Image (spheres, rainbow, N blue to C red):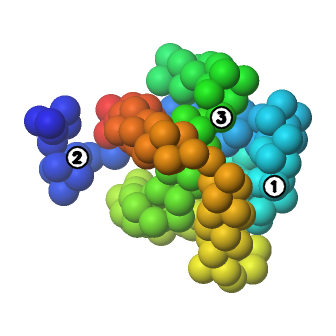
Amino acid sequence: HEAEAPPVAKWEPSVEGYLRFLVDSKLVFQTLEDIVERAAVPWYAEFRNTGLERSEALKKDLEWFRQQGHTIPEPSPPGTTYASLLEELSEKDPQAFICHFYNVYFAHTAGGRMIGKKVSEKILNKKELEFYKWEGNLSQLLQNVRNKLNEVASSWSREEKDHCLEETEKSFAYSGGLLRHIFT
Protein backbone atom coordinates (compact mmCIF):
# COMPACT_ATOMS: atom_id res chain seq x y z
CA HIS A 1 0.00 0.00 0.00
CA GLU A 2 1.14 3.52 -0.71
CA ALA A 3 1.61 5.80 2.25
CA GLU A 4 -1.33 8.13 2.75
CA ALA A 5 0.76 10.70 4.60
CA PRO A 6 4.37 11.86 4.67
CA PRO A 7 6.84 10.17 7.02
CA VAL A 8 6.53 11.24 10.68
CA ALA A 9 9.89 13.02 10.49
CA LYS A 10 8.36 15.58 8.09
CA TRP A 11 5.18 16.13 10.09
CA GLU A 12 4.72 19.04 12.40
CA PRO A 13 2.20 18.18 15.12
CA SER A 14 -0.29 20.79 16.28
CA VAL A 15 -1.97 21.10 19.66
CA GLU A 16 -5.39 21.24 17.98
CA GLY A 17 -4.71 18.08 16.01
CA TYR A 18 -3.30 16.34 19.07
CA LEU A 19 -6.42 17.24 21.03
CA ARG A 20 -8.58 15.71 18.27
CA PHE A 21 -6.44 12.57 18.48
CA LEU A 22 -6.79 12.42 22.29
CA VAL A 23 -10.56 13.01 22.19
CA ASP A 24 -11.10 10.33 19.55
CA SER A 25 -8.73 7.96 21.37
CA LYS A 26 -10.68 8.48 24.59
CA LEU A 27 -13.89 7.55 22.78
CA VAL A 28 -12.32 4.40 21.32
CA PHE A 29 -10.77 3.28 24.61
CA GLN A 30 -13.99 4.04 26.52
CA THR A 31 -15.93 2.00 23.95
CA LEU A 32 -13.55 -0.95 24.37
CA GLU A 33 -13.82 -0.71 28.15
CA ASP A 34 -17.62 -0.50 28.03
CA ILE A 35 -17.83 -3.52 25.71
CA VAL A 36 -15.72 -5.75 27.95
CA GLU A 37 -17.64 -4.51 30.99
CA ARG A 38 -21.00 -5.45 29.40
CA ALA A 39 -19.54 -8.74 28.12
CA ALA A 40 -22.22 -9.54 25.53
CA VAL A 41 -19.88 -12.42 24.71
CA PRO A 42 -19.06 -14.05 28.07
CA TRP A 43 -15.31 -14.32 27.51
CA TYR A 44 -15.03 -10.54 26.98
CA ALA A 45 -15.17 -10.36 30.78
CA GLU A 46 -11.65 -11.86 30.81
CA PHE A 47 -10.41 -8.48 29.58
CA ARG A 48 -11.78 -6.33 32.39
CA ASN A 49 -9.38 -4.44 34.64
CA THR A 50 -6.24 -5.45 32.78
CA GLY A 51 -4.30 -2.37 33.83
CA LEU A 52 -4.08 -1.30 30.18
CA GLU A 53 -7.29 0.76 30.28
CA ARG A 54 -6.75 4.33 29.07
CA SER A 55 -10.03 6.25 29.23
CA GLU A 56 -9.50 7.61 32.76
CA ALA A 57 -5.93 8.68 31.94
CA LEU A 58 -7.21 10.43 28.83
CA LYS A 59 -9.94 12.14 30.85
CA LYS A 60 -7.23 13.57 33.15
CA ASP A 61 -5.10 14.68 30.21
CA LEU A 62 -8.00 16.43 28.51
CA GLU A 63 -8.79 18.21 31.77
CA TRP A 64 -5.15 19.35 31.94
CA PHE A 65 -5.45 20.79 28.43
CA ARG A 66 -8.70 22.53 29.42
CA GLN A 67 -6.94 24.07 32.44
CA GLN A 68 -4.24 25.35 30.07
CA GLY A 69 -6.93 27.28 28.20
CA HIS A 70 -7.51 24.91 25.28
CA THR A 71 -10.96 24.14 23.94
CA ILE A 72 -11.63 20.41 23.95
CA PRO A 73 -13.33 19.37 20.69
CA GLU A 74 -16.13 16.88 20.31
CA PRO A 75 -15.24 13.45 18.89
CA SER A 76 -14.78 13.55 15.13
CA PRO A 77 -15.75 11.08 12.39
CA PRO A 78 -12.59 8.91 12.63
CA GLY A 79 -13.30 8.31 16.33
CA THR A 80 -17.08 8.00 16.15
CA THR A 81 -16.89 5.70 13.13
CA TYR A 82 -14.34 3.46 14.82
CA ALA A 83 -16.32 3.35 18.08
CA SER A 84 -19.46 2.37 16.13
CA LEU A 85 -17.56 -0.36 14.30
CA LEU A 86 -16.25 -1.74 17.60
CA GLU A 87 -19.79 -1.85 19.02
CA GLU A 88 -21.06 -3.64 15.93
CA LEU A 89 -18.21 -6.16 15.84
CA SER A 90 -18.52 -6.86 19.56
CA GLU A 91 -22.09 -8.07 19.00
CA LYS A 92 -21.77 -9.76 15.61
CA ASP A 93 -18.13 -10.76 15.11
CA PRO A 94 -16.23 -11.49 18.35
CA GLN A 95 -13.02 -12.67 16.66
CA ALA A 96 -12.79 -9.46 14.63
CA PHE A 97 -13.53 -7.44 17.77
CA ILE A 98 -10.69 -9.15 19.64
CA CYS A 99 -8.30 -8.31 16.82
CA HIS A 100 -9.17 -4.62 17.24
CA PHE A 101 -8.96 -4.89 21.04
CA TYR A 102 -5.49 -6.39 20.81
CA ASN A 103 -4.19 -3.98 18.20
CA VAL A 104 -5.50 -0.82 19.88
CA TYR A 105 -4.02 -1.67 23.27
CA PHE A 106 -0.76 -3.21 22.12
CA ALA A 107 -0.03 -0.57 19.47
CA HIS A 108 -0.52 2.16 22.06
CA THR A 109 2.02 0.58 24.39
CA ALA A 110 4.61 0.36 21.59
CA GLY A 111 4.54 2.89 18.77
CA GLY A 112 1.97 4.99 20.57
CA ARG A 113 4.38 5.73 23.41
CA MET A 114 7.10 6.69 20.94
CA ILE A 115 4.74 9.04 19.09
CA GLY A 116 3.56 10.52 22.39
CA LYS A 117 7.13 11.25 23.43
CA LYS A 118 7.95 12.93 20.10
CA VAL A 119 4.78 15.03 20.21
CA SER A 120 5.49 15.99 23.83
CA GLU A 121 8.98 17.16 22.90
CA LYS A 122 7.68 19.25 19.98
CA ILE A 123 4.56 20.88 21.38
CA LEU A 124 4.14 20.16 25.12
CA ASN A 125 7.49 21.22 26.57
CA LYS A 126 8.24 17.53 27.27
CA LYS A 127 5.20 17.05 29.54
CA GLU A 128 4.41 13.35 29.89
CA LEU A 129 0.68 12.77 29.66
CA GLU A 130 -1.17 10.23 31.80
CA PHE A 131 -2.11 8.45 28.56
CA TYR A 132 1.46 7.17 28.43
CA LYS A 133 1.74 6.02 32.06
CA TRP A 134 0.63 2.72 33.55
CA GLU A 135 0.44 1.50 37.12
CA GLY A 136 2.62 -1.55 37.56
CA ASN A 137 5.04 -3.20 35.20
CA LEU A 138 3.84 -2.60 31.63
CA SER A 139 5.60 -5.69 30.27
CA GLN A 140 3.81 -7.84 32.84
CA LEU A 141 0.44 -6.21 32.13
CA LEU A 142 0.91 -6.93 28.43
CA GLN A 143 1.95 -10.51 29.11
CA ASN A 144 -1.10 -11.06 31.31
CA VAL A 145 -3.40 -9.86 28.51
CA ARG A 146 -1.49 -11.89 25.94
CA ASN A 147 -1.99 -14.99 28.12
CA LYS A 148 -5.74 -14.31 28.40
CA LEU A 149 -5.98 -13.78 24.65
CA ASN A 150 -4.20 -17.08 24.00
CA GLU A 151 -6.45 -18.85 26.49
CA VAL A 152 -9.62 -17.46 24.89
CA ALA A 153 -8.41 -18.19 21.35
CA SER A 154 -7.46 -21.75 22.26
CA SER A 155 -11.14 -22.71 21.91
CA TRP A 156 -11.48 -21.09 18.48
CA SER A 157 -11.49 -23.05 15.26
CA ARG A 158 -8.70 -22.50 12.73
CA GLU A 159 -11.17 -20.48 10.63
CA GLU A 160 -12.00 -18.21 13.60
CA LYS A 161 -8.31 -17.65 14.32
CA ASP A 162 -7.65 -16.82 10.68
CA HIS A 163 -10.63 -14.49 10.63
CA CYS A 164 -9.25 -12.66 13.65
CA LEU A 165 -5.88 -12.22 11.95
CA GLU A 166 -7.52 -11.04 8.72
CA GLU A 167 -9.03 -8.08 10.58
CA THR A 168 -5.56 -6.66 11.38
CA GLU A 169 -5.30 -4.45 8.30
CA LYS A 170 -8.68 -2.87 9.04
CA SER A 171 -7.71 -2.22 12.67
CA PHE A 172 -4.51 -0.48 11.55
CA ALA A 173 -6.46 1.63 9.06
CA TYR A 174 -8.90 2.85 11.72
CA SER A 175 -6.13 3.54 14.24
CA GLY A 176 -4.18 5.36 11.53
CA GLY A 177 -7.19 7.59 10.97
CA LEU A 178 -6.94 8.70 14.60
CA LEU A 179 -3.18 9.21 14.43
CA ARG A 180 -3.44 11.44 11.36
CA HIS A 181 -5.18 14.04 13.54
CA ILE A 182 -1.89 14.79 15.30
CA PHE A 183 -0.34 16.20 12.19
CA THR A 184 -3.25 18.26 10.89
How many neighbours does mark 2 have within 10 angstroms: few (below 14), some (14-19), or many (20 or more)?
few
Percent from the top left, x then y, of residue 11?
A: 22, 46
**Which amino acid does the dot numbered 3 rest on?**
Pro
Q: Residue under label 2, please give it.
A: 11
Nearer-N-terminus badge (2/3): 2
| Residue 60 in view, yes or no | no
**Which amino acid does the dot numbered 1 rest on?**
Glu
| Residue 107 in view, yes or no | yes
Q: Quarter holding the C terminus?
A: top left
Comparing 109 with 99, the one in front is 99
Q: Residue 94 carries which label?
A: 3
Under circle 3, the secondary element is: helix
Nearer-N-terminus badge (2/1): 2
Q: Residue at (49%, 40%) from the top-left corner?
A: 159
Q: Residue 46 carries which label?
A: 1
Q: Does 28 appear above or below 82? A: below
Q: Residue at (78%, 45%) from the top-left corner?
A: 44
Q: Does 65 appear above or below 83? A: below
Q: How many labels does the image show?
A: 3
The quadrant holding residue 36 is top right
Apparent side of residue 86 relative to residue 41 in the rendered image (left or right): left
Q: Does 135 appear above or below 20? A: below
Cα distance in 3D space between marks 2 and 1: 39 Å
How many neighbours does mark 1 have within 10 angstroms: few (below 14), some (14-19), or many (20 or more)?
some
**Which amino acid does the dot numbered 2 rest on?**
Trp
Percent from the top left, x then y, of residue 154?
A: 64, 58
Comparing 156 with 179, the one in front is 156
